[in-house]
Amino acid sequence: MSNPPIRPGHTARHILVILGLLASGCASVGNTPQQEYTLESYNHCRTAGGTIQPVTLDRVAADGRYWYRYYGGFDQRAFLDCMAAYRREHPFLDWVKARQRTPTGTLAVAPGQGVGTQLEPTGAAVPIWKVGDEWQYAYKSPSDSGSYVWSVNRVETLDGVQHYVIKTGTREIFYRVSDLASSLERVDGVVIQRDTPSRLSYVWPLTVGKTWEQTHRQERPADRSTTDRNSLWTTESEETVTVPAGTFRTLKITWRNKNTGALLYEMWYAPDVKQWVKIREILSNGVREREMIAFKLN
């Protein structure tokens, strides 16, 4: 499973032109959760230490990025360090789940209502994605937290085979149309990961108890690294899972190192939204969790 996308972060920047000043960082009806999260961080840091800091937000984008201005002898570094520390201590995923609400207003994707339909005994069939389908996720890891949107941008032929191209920021991820096997990732047009053969995260139809194995090579040209993997996937169970986007009937899939038995991830795939809604990945520095917070299907 690919890493969260490289995207513009929550880095503050100066601007000379005020772009829609937000009064005192107060949340308003129609703000996205990312905006409210930034405003909450700002309000905390603006009054840290019991003194109101001379800093004002000029604009908070829908994805939570912010612009600010200040006056007097303001310590920018202390303010930015406070914002970063607040986000580490209150990851966006936890913040969203604590409020148990789906995104509304100007969010880039429509909120999911959640579904609970019984899965067919014959199993989940390979989904058909359409250009414009979107899934939004919140994530947290030992080093970072935030949100991003996966959007089906187009269908493109790669090595003679049709692939869906998922776009998020400047990152593009290529999934084979026939089975959603992952083949390639590019950032700013540069290949950063290639799987040979394409990685089989699913074998359709998905049914409880189904297992599949694959030996494949993962190349990361930018890092000049190559990893040979011997993988084992298992569809372990059917579970009802609640995430910020709603409640879904899912199939739980695990991915393990076949040689050692080490768990690489647990993933919950929901047929009704044609995508996984939750994943727990085991990384070298700890566990990364991602959950769907909204979706839009055409």
Image: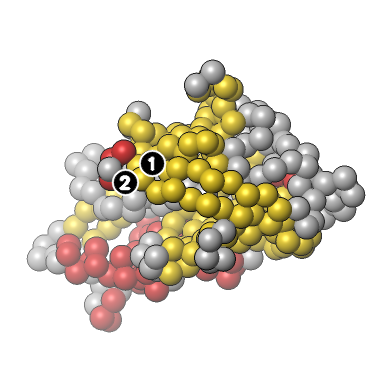
Farthest-out residue, bottom: 50
**Residue at image x 68%, y 57%?**
234
The answer to whether the residues at label 2 and label 1 have Cβ atoms under 8 Å apart is yes
In this view, 189 is above or below 272: above
* Residue 255 place in picture, x, y as percent: 59, 57
Q: What residue is shown at x 73% (from left), y 37% (from top)?
A: 126
Judging depth in this view, the residue of 284 and 295 nearest the camera is 284
Mark linked to residue 225: 2
Q: CA distance from mark 2 to mark 1?
A: 6 Å
> Number of callouts in the render?
2
Q: Amino acid at mark 2?
A: Ser
Amino acid carrying mark 1 in the image? Glu
- Residue 82 sits in quarter: bottom left
The residue at which mark 1 appears reads as 219
**Is disc 1 placed on a helix, strand or loop?**
strand
Query: Splitting the image into 4 quarters, where does residue 250 fall?
Result: bottom right
Residue 217, can we see it? Answer: yes
